[in-house]
Image: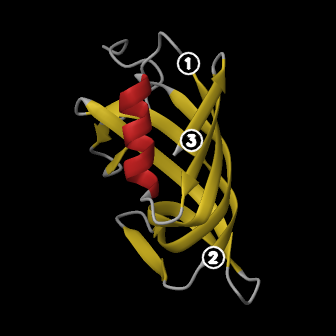
Amino acid sequence: MQAIHDGTEWVLRLDDGQDLFESLVAFAEREHVTAAAVVSGIGMFRKAAFGYWDGTQYRPEELTVPHEVVALHGTIARADGAPSVHLHGAAAGPDHRLVGGHLLRATVGVLQEIVLTTYPGRTFGRPFVESWGLRMLDLEPGDHP
């Protein structure tokens, strides 16, 4: 991975074969990022799985052939003392049709270019919310009664 920044803005390049989530978690740990927004991402996935939340669980759609990433965005927060990456996106297959939703897992194909904004001095949380059965972003953890 290559990474450069100018203030709070970062541009990352992930390379062929890298696990997208493992790479972003490693980046967050190395750079002490505890609050960030993934603004955009383009490139290719060698394989991936997108999920659709049906109200009780994610229904996955597995991509087993390479797809062009046309949109990628999300957040980096903290959950259980570790970086927590939440991404949504869309990818186009060889038939030019899009598949998208909550990104469950992905392996980079060729490369992935990601732009993100960090919020130094802040920590976003991602607590489990029992009523939804999901971890949800908390912009100001610890400020709730």
Asked if residue 136 can be seen in this view, the reply is no
Q: Residue furthest right?
A: 96
Q: In the rendered image, which residue does mark 2 sit on?
A: 67
First along the sequence among labels 1 and 3 = 3
Residue appearing at x 70%, y 87% in the figure: 94
Q: In the rendered image, which residue does mark 1 sit on?
A: 119
Q: Quadrant of residue 145?
A: top left
Report the mark closest to the observer, 2 or 1. 2
3 on left or right of 80: right
Q: In the rendered image, which residue does mark 3 sit on?
A: 2
Asked if residue 130 can be seen in this view, the reply is yes
Indicate the secondary structure of the residue bearing disc 2: strand
Q: Rounded to the nearest whole Å, what is the CA distance between mark 2 and mark 1?
A: 31 Å
Whether the residues at callouts 1 and 3 have beta carbons within 8 Å, the answer is no
Graded by Cα atoms within 10 Å as few (under 14), some (14 to 19) or many (20 or more), the crowding at tag 3 reads few
Give the numbered dot on residue 79. none
Q: Rounded to the nearest whole Å, what is the CA distance between mark 1 and mark 3?
A: 20 Å
Residue appearing at x 52%, y 51% in the figure: 87
- Going by the numbered disc 1, the residue's amino acid type is Tyr
First along the sequence among labels 3 and 2 = 3
